Image (cartoon, grey):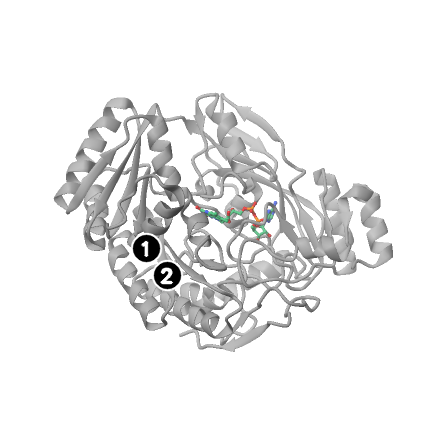
């Protein structure tokens, strides 16, 4: 709970209704979409203006109260779990699209806008904001920016950082910073916009953003290519790119995922196939037709047993929906679903999936893999049960091996979900000790009191992996009854 005088001061800033600190309220903000992590905050606040955000941060800085920024809580790296308690600052009331500038092709919005709502608004004007995380119907743009979210269209159009041109953000001392703007060219000093994109709430609270828009593609076409084996599908991905075609989307489902998705969505996916590629191309009609024809040919040459091209936009949307259903479908299988996002250069895709399957077998756990084949961003997803501590231990060991395998194949520990708490013990594998030191120095320069989202990104002890189990009775600030601090070596 917040100290009564602090709660009173915060209520004076935002109004009585927007500060919550009962145990029930705190419980509701103690977790996010990441399984196994949970910790109670001291209170929750929902500001309605940037001035209110700045005033809240000033109180927290003065009182040394930790701050956890939060959008929809859909992240998959435990980024909004208040592991050191403090105040959860929910940005969902800042939910206005402030401008769509059709002359400069930019849009300016507040962080609480739901991603798909921005898509709808700009598309009505024939414009396009491509980043489309699978969670776009629930995620906020602030959360997308803080995680540098990717999505299904990442291969052709890039990810969130490729579109954000400027930001307004409240710094840990309560000062308001403006970075970048609408100018397409701007090299005035360090690129603070890029620094804040992907900073996972650890440097500042984003209160406004300006993003680049592009013209909406004239049309799009969707196709499925079904392969008896994984290698054929991976070869097709490399061949398509080698033929100088960049599809808007190139998604991959392995056999285990196909079976679970078909059981859930009943859309006629062939459950006996080793892998399916879902490919979408967009652009001018003639180019789309040509590319889809050529891509279908390549898939057949690489062993596709069937290629199905959607006849209409509606049918195409239904097929792509199958991919968006993947996580929900897998989540039905067992009580706990752990989704990771190990990423490799696309040419190593087949090898990576084979290694994931071998690792799952070694640890006797169930892993389905799907993901963004075009950019090598895989989502090995484990269906497990967090109540079974022995199995969870094997799952942890398996994922550790999967991250190491991704690094060895020239990839990374996370392609789009961020580090948060879930992968903080692996960050040094990717960026090295020098990288960690530079990041820590930046963090210290901007947030010397360490009040912004503490306990994230950086391992407290690089040889120690901490797994905080949810459920049961939580101790304040984290480790509940089920808390396990497992000793694993990270290399
Ligand atoms: C079904 C499903 C599918 C998903 N698919 C994808 C996908 O395809 N691609 C992808 O990249 N991710 C995906 N995700 C993960 C998640 O949706 C993204 O990380 C998303 O960007 C989080 O947005 P959010 O509003 O829920 O942010 P939250 O989860 O609330 O917060 C995420 C992080 O951002 C920080 N934060 C939030 N708002 C602000 C702010 N205004 N200022 C500063 N920091 C802030 C938080 O502190 C936290 O560290 C998926 C998740 C689910 C559940």
Going 46% across and 77% down the picture, which residue do you hit?
Answer: 488
Q: Is residue 6 left or right of residue 152?
A: right
SS category of the residue bearing label 2: strand
Q: CA distance from mark 2 to mark 1?
A: 8 Å
Of callouts 2 and 1, the N-terminal one:
1
Q: Which residue is mark 1?
A: 256
State if disc 1 and disc 2 touch (CB < 8 Å): yes
Which residue does the numbered mark 2 point to in the structure image? 367
Residue at 19 percent across and 37 percent down: it is 296
Q: Is residue 274 left or right of residue 64?
A: left
Q: Residue at x 49, y 68 (%)?
A: 425
Q: Quadrant of residue 482?
A: bottom right
Residue 436 seen in this snapshot: yes
Which quadrant of the view contains residue 282? top left
- x, y (%) of residue 5? 87, 55
Query: Is residue 61 among what the camera can see?
Result: no
Which of the pair 159/92 is nearer the observer?
92
In the rendered view of the protein, which quadrant contains the C terminus?
bottom left
Q: In the rendering, at what x and y percent does residue 210 appear?
A: 55, 34
Check disc 2: other Cα within 10 Å, few if <14, some if 14-19, many if 20+: many
Q: Quadrant of the N terminus?
A: bottom right
Vertical relation: 265 (above or below) 272: above
Q: Is residue 379 left or right of residue 112?
A: left
- Measuring from the top left, give residue 4's x and y in whole percent: 86, 56
Looking at the rendered structure, the secondary structure element under dot 1 is: helix
Q: Which one is nearer the viewer's eye here, 268 or 154? A: 268
- Vertical placement of residue 13 versus 430, above or below: above
């Amino acid at each position: 709970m917040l100290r009564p005088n602090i709660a009173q001061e915060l209520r004076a800033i935002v109004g009585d209704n927007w500060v919550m600190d009962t145990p029930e309220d705190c419980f509701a903000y103690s977790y996010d979409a990441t399984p196994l992590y949970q910790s109670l905050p001291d209170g929750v606040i929902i500001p309605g203006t940037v001035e209110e955000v700045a005033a809240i941060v000033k109180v927290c800085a003065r009182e040394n109260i930790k701050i956890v920024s939060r959008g929809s809580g859909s992240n998959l790296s435990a980024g909004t779990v208040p592991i050191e308690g403090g105040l959860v600052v929910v940005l969902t009331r800042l939910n206005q699209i402030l401008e769509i500038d059709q002359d400069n092709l930019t849009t300016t919005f507040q962080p609480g806008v739901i991603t798909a709502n921005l898509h709808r608004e700009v598309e009505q004007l024939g414009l396009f904001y491509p980043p489309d995380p699978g969670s776009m119907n629930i995620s906020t743009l602030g959360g997308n920016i803080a995680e540098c979210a990717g999505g299904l269209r990442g291969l052709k159009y890039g990810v969130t950082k490729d579109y954000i041109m400027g930001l307004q953000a409240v710094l840990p001392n309560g000062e308001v910073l403006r970075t970048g703007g609408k100018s397409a060219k701007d090299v005035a000093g360090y690129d603070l916009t890029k620094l804040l994109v992907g900073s996972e709430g650890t440097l500042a609270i984003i209160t406004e953003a300006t993003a680049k828009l592009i013209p909406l593609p004239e049309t799009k076409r969707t196709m499925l290519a079904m392969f008896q084996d994984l290698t054929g599908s991976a070869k097709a991905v490399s061949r398509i790119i080698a033929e100088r075609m960049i599809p808007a989307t190139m998604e991959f489902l392995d056999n285990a995922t196909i079976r679970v998705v078909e059981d859930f969505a009943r859309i006629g996916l062939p459950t006996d196939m080793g892998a399916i590629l879902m490919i979408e191309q967009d652009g001018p009609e003639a180019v789309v037709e040509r590319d889809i024809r050529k891509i279908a040919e390549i898939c057949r040459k690489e062993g596709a047993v069937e290629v199905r091209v959607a006849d209409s936009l509606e049918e195409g949307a239904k097929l792509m929906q199958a991919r968006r259903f993947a996580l929900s479908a897998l989540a039905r299988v067992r009580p706990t679903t752990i989704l990771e996002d190990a990423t490799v250069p696309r040419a190593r895709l087949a090898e990576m999936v084979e290694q994931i399957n071998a690792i799952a077998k070694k640890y006797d756990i169930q892993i389905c893999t799907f993901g963004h084949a075009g950019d090598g961003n895989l989502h090995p997803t484990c269906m497990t049960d967090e109540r079974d501590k022995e199995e969870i231990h094997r799952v942890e060991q398996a994922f550790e091996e999967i991250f190491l395998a991704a690094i060895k194949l020239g990839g990374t520990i996370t392609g789009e979900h961020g580090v948060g708490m879930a992968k903080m013990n692996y960050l040094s594998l990717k960026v090295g000790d020098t990288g960690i030191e530079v990041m820590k120095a930046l963090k210290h320069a901007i947030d010397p009191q360490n009040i912004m989202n503490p306990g994230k990104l950086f391992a407290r002890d690089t040889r120690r992996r901490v797994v905080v189990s949810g459920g049961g009775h939580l101790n304040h600030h984290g480790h509940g009854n089920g808390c396990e601090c497992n000793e694993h070596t990270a290399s």
